[in-house]
Image (spheres, rainbow, N blue to C red):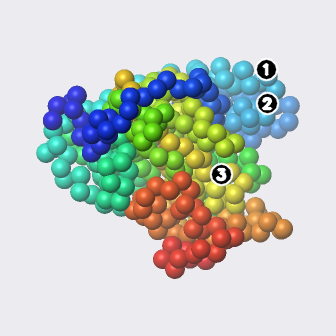
Amino acid sequence: MSSTEPLYNVQRVDQQIKPRQPPARPPQIFPLLCLHCTIMASPPRSPGQPNRPCSEDGIPVVDLAVLVNGDARERSQAVRHLGRACQDWGFFMSAMMDACKELFGLPPEQKAEFMDAGPMDPVRVGTGFNSAVDGARYWRDYVKMFAHPELHCPAKPDGLRGVAAEYAARTRGLLLELTAAISESLGLPAGRIAERLDLGSCFQILVGNHYPPCAAGPDDDDGAVGLPAHSDHGLLTLLFQNGVDGLQVKHDGRWLLAKPIPGSFFVIAGDQLEIVSNGRYKGVLHRALVDRAQARMSCVSLLGPCLDAVVKPVPELAVPPLGLEFRGVKYRDYMEHQQSNKLNEKGALDLVRVQRHILTDTLCSS
Ligand SMILES: O=C(O)CCC(=O)C(=O)O
Ligand SMILES: [Fe+2]
């Protein structure tokens, strides 16, 4: 199979369905928290103290609180700092995407050992979401690599391991900084979420996604979808795209386009953030559409709790009359459940919601 003919199990969808019609209205740009790469949460500052653009070691610092709550002048200053901060990340982002692209173009025999892997195997190459349960329904090739505590990676292409190691380390640092900032934004000490989820032994996974062009898309009846609506199983996800539209986010009941911005990451809140924040922050429902003419690619770096951590809401956030919104669940069990079943929006999270009382012995431990 050549690089222009990647492996995917839905090749025939475009021959079965009508050509795609132009969308009825122009897509909306979704103002999701979109962070240029080297965003760092600054240490807490006292009122009146100016926003500091650099930490002592020279790493550019952007105060999330200013981005979210600052006045127009403060926000535009923070955005300028973000722009400066992102410069050398661009290199690692495109190197990561290029390495994934090369992997998708390898002959099947060089990927065969990873193609029968199960959801909890450390390296997995496949099509759709989980072709064992979803059939040939989704127009997507993917590679998933467990990246922390240990990096697992196919031996080919040659450069992949080095790029993935660097990329994983950098994005992990950023994700941990974001977690500290989010903890503070909840009124908690910066380290509270990390402590609760044992992030000293955090889990991290890298995913490369490739969506070949498809003649018929979601605007058609039965059109192809890259990845259906879901929230991510982890705590936080960083995602960047190759410039082809396709990522959509559900907001106020409507699907909004998360327009790719060169050199930028989208930050997507995952299910474990919803649990640990006791529902204050919601796991974001998102999906990937395909393009009729161009191949779309995305690279994902997902941070999760320690696999053996039992994730429960931080008690300080479970105040009456609300109380606890979620039962405790071991992250490993949650992830395995979500990855082994058909993607069903936020169905996995619903299983651990206290109100629903749909609890399984295997999934929940209080
Ligand atoms: O390709 C995209 O934009 C979305 C990918 C995604 O949601 C995922 O890998 O979990
Ligand atoms: Fe996702």
Secondary structure beneath disc 2?
Answer: loop
Q: Which residue is mark 2?
A: 70
In the image, residue 165 lies at what x, y percent?
36, 42
* In the rendered image, the vertical position of residue 71 relative to residue 278, given as above or below: above
Instruction: Say which quarter of the image contains residue 149.
Output: bottom left
* Marks 2 and 1 close (CB-CB < 8 Å): yes
State how far apart marks 2 and 1 are (Cα).
Answer: 8 Å
Locate residue 57 relative to residue 72 in the image: left or right.
left
Q: For mark 3, what is the residue?
A: 282
The answer to whether one can see residue 186 in this image is: yes
Question: Between 28 and 182, which is closer to the camera in this rendering?
Answer: 28
- Rendered view: 249 above or below 130: above
Q: Of 214 and 239, which appears nearest the observer?
A: 214
Residue appearing at x 72%, y 21% in the figure: 76
Residue 72 position (above or below residue 304):
above
SS under mark 3? loop
Question: What's the residue type where badge 3 is placed?
Answer: Lys
Mark 3 neighbour class, 10 Å CA radius: few under 14, some 14 to 19, many 20 or more: some
> Could you say whether the residue bearing mark 1 is in a helix, strand or loop?
helix
The circle on residue 73 is 1
Location of residue 74 by image quarter: top right
